[in-house]
Amino acid sequence: MKQACFYLPWALVKDDEEAGILCQRAWLLFRENLLSLDTVAIDASRYQADEDDVFRAIAALEKSLDGILETVPARLK
Amino acid sequence: MLATHVVPWTSAPRVASARTTRAERHGAWKRPGGTDGWCGGHEKARLYGRSVTRVSASDARGGASMENHVQFLLSLTRRAALVATVSGLCLGPALASESEEEASPDQEPSTSDSIAEQPSVVAADSTSTPPSGSPLDDPWEGSYVKPALTVSQYVEEVRVSHAECPPALFARNVSLDFANTPYHFFSPIVDHGEPRGSVRRAAVSCGFHEIQPAG
């Protein structure tokens, strides 16, 4: 899924440039949230983060993933 | 009145010859840009050399006439115009790019032909400008990527992968052979040996047995 999200803006920009740019920004946010989830999970394994922090990170990751899919125009889905 | 005519005749050749000598001694004019950062240093040396030659020839004739003085002033003006032109040619693109960046920092290209060139342009800008700190400022940072699939195929791949995600959050890293493992196995989500709240419910909903803590 991460690989598909990475390539999606580049495939999209050929057909719709503005949508590709928005998709690329959404991908960067997704990647940032993915790194945040990784960090929080590691902290949680050391009892340095609460489980709610982990779930907030997961929710943010899910939201950013939805953001990636929302940037794709309906005619290209 | 005569002194004002004599001053440029006596001072200009000295300065010009001194600069020519320095340029020849250091060889700065051989490199584009020169050591003093003056773009087109060889042009400067050539201009100074020409003025020295012209003034020396007129000096040899021994006449400090008004006509020669006017010619010298004209050569100075021409030289200034050439210097301004060369400086403008050197600094023009840089100033133009700066003004474009200031005018539209987030402006994206509007033609599809410029899409392929965009990553290289962004890469050049990222090397010349200091990083701003946020990756969202430059969405095309990095090299150009050639996707192998179409948009619809990538969207489908994301959807299929996403559909597997909720149970996979707990079950993917632990194979089904560990289905009977109590959720205490997941030490990262256990607080002081007792899972709480949503983690507990999620673990139970994924099929893990709930056991009562000892004691």
Image (spheres, rainbow, N blue to C red):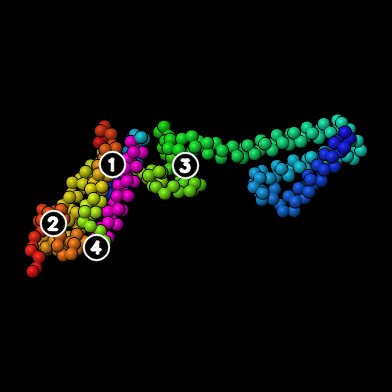
* Residue of label 2: B200
Q: Is residue B112 above or below residue A49?
A: above
Q: On what subunit does the disc labeled 2 rest? A: B
Which of pointers 4 and 1 lies earlier in the amino acid sequence? 4
Pinpoint residue B73: horizontal percent, then vertical percent. Answer: 79, 34
Let me know if marks 3 and 1 both belong to one chain: no
Mark 4 and mark 1 residues within 8 Å of each other at the beta carbon = no
* Nearest to N terminus: mark 3 or mark 2: 3
Q: Determine which quarter of the picture holds residue B192.
A: bottom left
Q: Tell me whether the residue at label 1 lies in contact with that at label 2, contact meaning CB atoms closer than 8 angstroms.
A: no
Is residue B57 visible in the rendered image? The answer is: no
Residue at 28% x, 41% y: name it.
A68
Q: Crowdedness of circle 4 by 10 Å Cα count: few (<14), some, many (20+)?
A: some
Q: Chain of mark 1?
A: A
For marks 3 and 2, give the one nearer the viewer.
2
At a point 76% along the width and 36% down the height, the residue shown is B76
Check the picture and name the quadrant holding the C terminus of chain B: bottom left
Disc 2 on helix, strand or loop? Answer: helix
Residue marked by disc 3: B121
Local packing at callout 2 (Cα closer than 10 Å; few below 14, some 14-19, many 20+) is some
The residue that disc 1 covers is A68
Q: Secondary structure at mark 1?
A: helix
Left/right placement of residue A25 relative to residue B65 reads left
x and y, in percent, of residue B3 in the image: 87, 37
Q: Circles 2 and 4: CB distance less than 8 Å?
A: no
On residue A47, the disc is: 4
Find the distance from the CA under tag 4 to the CA under tag 3.
45 Å
Q: Nearer the viewer, residue B114 or B98?
A: B98
**In whole angstroms, how far apart are the C-alphas of marks 3 and 2?**
51 Å
Label 3–label 2 contact, CB within 8 A: no
Q: Secondary structure at mark 3?
A: helix
